[in-house]
Amino acid sequence: MREEYDFSKSVPNPYVKKLKKQVTIRLEEDVVDYFKDLSEETDIPYQTLINLYLKDCVKSQRKLSLEWVS
């Protein structure tokens, strides 16, 4: 291993914006079951499906319409 390396010709990582961030999220069991079932149908991992769905919501600027019932 060298004592020093020359990084003068290095370039920034072009994929840095595509990196994923690991988070902990609590989802109801029926939501996870839905995506797991969909995963079996599509052969796409369920976590990827959840990410794709959320990404679509972001892209289309979809917002929830919540009404609190008292």
Image (cartoon, rainbow, N blue to C red):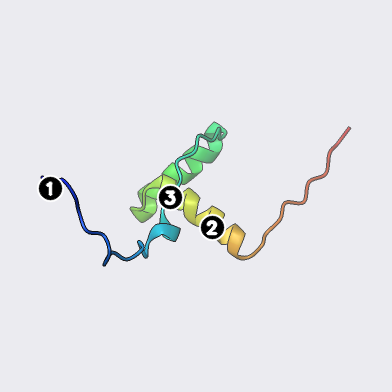
Residue 19, compared with residue 10, is above or below; it is above
Q: Secondary structure at mark 1?
A: loop
Relative horizontal placement of residue 17, taking residue 60 as reference (left or right)? left
Relative horizontal placement of residue 69, taking residue 52 as reference (left or right)? right
Residue at image position (28%, 64%) is 10
Residue 64, compared with residue 33, is above or below; it is below
Q: Earlier in the sequence, mark 3 or mark 2?
A: 3
Relative horizontal placement of residue 67, taking residue 56 as reference (left or right)? right
The residue that label 3 is drawn on is: 20
Taking the view exactly as shown, the residue that stands out farthest to the left is: 1
Three-letter amino acid code at disc 2? Lys
Residue 20, compared with residue 68, is above or below; it is below
Q: Earlier in the sequence, mark 3 or mark 1?
A: 1
3D distance between C-alphas at marks 3 and 1 = 32 Å
Residue 27 % position (x, y): 56, 35
Residue 52 % position (x, y): 48, 56
